[in-house]
Amino acid sequence: MYFNEEGKNITKQIIDNRTILIEGTDVKSRIYAREKAKEMRSSEYEVFTKDDKGRLVFIGYGIPK
């Protein structure tokens, strides 16, 4: 399951192809996400999963279509 930084579940948007998921926690992933969002005239935001204790763990970026 995927979540935004507020903890809202965004898994359905990713599965329905309404949000592009760019996995990666490095600087190259962030730069790519920004460029892709700019190209699509959208914005990027951080995407998380939850660990076994229920805490959000950063995994990449989401770009809504």
Image (cartoon, grey):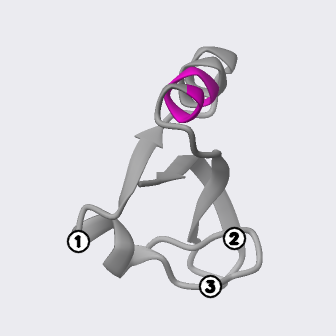
Quickly name the residue at label 1: 16
Is the residue under label 1 in contact with that under label 3 (CB below 8 Å)? no
Q: Residue at x 74, y 68 (%)?
A: 5
Q: In terms of secondary structure, where does tag 3 sit? A: loop
Residue flagged by tag 1: what amino acid is it? Asp
Quickly name the residue at label 3: 8
Relative to residue 28, is residue 39 drawn left or right?
left
Cα separation, mark 2 vs mark 3, equals: 11 Å
Relative to residue 23, is residue 47 drawn left or right?
right
Q: Residue at x 59, y 29 (%)?
A: 38
Expressed as whole percent of the image width and height from the top left, the position of residue 35 reads: 57, 21
Is the residue under label 2 in contact with that under label 1 (CB below 8 Å)? no
Q: In terms of secondary structure, where does tag 1 sit? A: loop
Rendered position, 23 above or below 33? below
Expressed as whole percent of the image width and height from the top left, the position of residue 28 reads: 60, 14
Quickly name the residue at label 2: 56
